[in-house]
Image (cartoon, grey):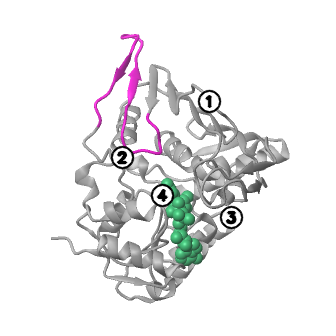
Amino acid sequence: MTPKTKIGIVGCGNISGTYLKVAKTFDILEVVACADVIPELAQAKAAEYGVPKACSPDELLADPEIEIVVNLTPPAAHAGIALQALQAGKSVYNEKPLAIEREDAQRMLQLAEQKGLRVGCAPDTFMGAGLQTCRKLIDEGAIGRPIAATAFMLSRGPEPWHPNPEFFYQRGGGPMFDMGPYYLTALVTLLGPVKRVSGATQMTFPQRVIGSGPKKGNPIPVEIPTHIVGLLEFAAGALGTIITSFDVWAHQLPRIELYGTDGTLSVPDPNTFGGPVKLWRPEKREWQEVPLLPLPAENSRSLGVADMAYAMRSGRPHRANGALAYHVLDLMHTIHDAAREGRHIDVSSTCERPAPLSIESLTN
Ligand SMILES: NC(=O)c1ccc[n+]([C@@H]2O[C@H](COP(=O)([O-])OP(=O)(O)OC[C@H]3O[C@@H](n4cnc5c(N)ncnc54)[C@H](O)[C@@H]3O)[C@@H](O)[C@H]2O)c1
């Protein structure tokens, strides 16, 4: 039997329940502690999910048992917690985005390299049945040579339902930094890295109003663009268009489509692990739903942590890795930079496409 990798969760808010539930389904993972700046939240999650220890973040980071710190704090705390974890000799897996600032993310990757530790980062949805089926189809040439991609994430913003939506309208928030990681990670894992971008952005409404919870009716000043249009030139040659928006009431656009010399692939919502995957080929002249590979199709957040734990045992690279997450963070910033400066910008980072996933390849 593979020895368990002991993990500690920092940040016991909204998304932590999913990680705590799903981590139990992986033989290699054992959650031994959870922590939050609000002690009652850590205690409540520990009691609910049978975690042996609820403690402060500092105590968790000092626990010699823990090999991987899973960092589920809000984006502004990602870099601080990750750097502390690495300093303490632990590998770290951050929720998205890797950090808010590129410099902090670079510091993280350098420190991990120096210390022989790993940095992992959400999203891991690209390892699910839906996007892995797309990956297989692309690699097998089902649409020929990819020539273009479109990706659309348009909504009217999270403030109607989210009780604490202020951070969505501050630096590091906005539709690109919040939702862009799903779309860009999907595109980069399917088509490879991006070499040049341009963009245009707009801040449509200077103020938002909280729509639920105790702060209902409170205004939020908007400090960042809320409609972002990006053009992506992939190193392998395809051209991509991405729009992320918190300004749109309704639309009928697809989530992601890939266009090739020999067909079109309709890619499922990259914020999920499942399908549907649909392929259009000229000889059939109709959309055909493609059966999904036998991989997780339900909400499996922590799949990337399990893959990293197995990779640390065998020495292979892990899939939801720091270089991929850094490239995605860099793309999001560079689209905003290009919009501000009114020009195309060469992207200074790059990354490898992670290896495709099969159930057999996950557990070794
Ligand atoms: N909520 C979702 O549906 C969702 C989905 C996918 C990803 N995410 C990502 O997960 C992360 C967390 O999101 P969330 O919705 O769970 O947020 P949240 O605000 O509900 O929870 C974050 C928790 O972290 C704690 N915290 C803040 N600073 C801390 C620090 N320095 N040390 C320890 N604990 C600290 C807070 O007290 C809070 O309990 C974000 O990066 C977000 O982008 C959220």
Which residue is denoted by mark 4 in the rendering?
122
Q: Indicate yes or no: mark 4 CB to ligand 1 under 8 Å.
A: yes
Is 228 contained in the magenta span? no
Pointer 3 local density, CA inside 10 Å: few below 14, some 14–19, many at least 20 = some
CA gap, disc 2 to disc 3? Answer: 28 Å
Pointer 4 local density, CA inside 10 Å: few below 14, some 14–19, many at least 20 = many
Q: Which residues are magenta?
A: 268-292
* Element carrying mark 2: loop
Which residue is denoted by mark 1 in the rendering?
250
Q: Which quadrant is home to the N terminus?
A: bottom left
CA gap, disc 1 to disc 2? Answer: 28 Å
Foreground tag (3 vs 1): 1
- The x, y position of residue 61, in whole percent, is 47, 84
Q: Is residue 228 above or below residue 107?
A: above
Residue 358 visible in image: yes
Amino acid found under the numbered disc labelled 2: Gly
Q: Indicate yes or no: mark 2 CB to ligand 1 under 8 Å.
A: no
In the image, which disc is placed on residue 147?
none
Amino acid found under the numbered disc labelled 4: Ala
In the image, which disc is placed on residue 101?
3
- The x, y position of residue 186, in whole percent, is 49, 43
**First in sequence: mark 2 vs mark 3:** 3
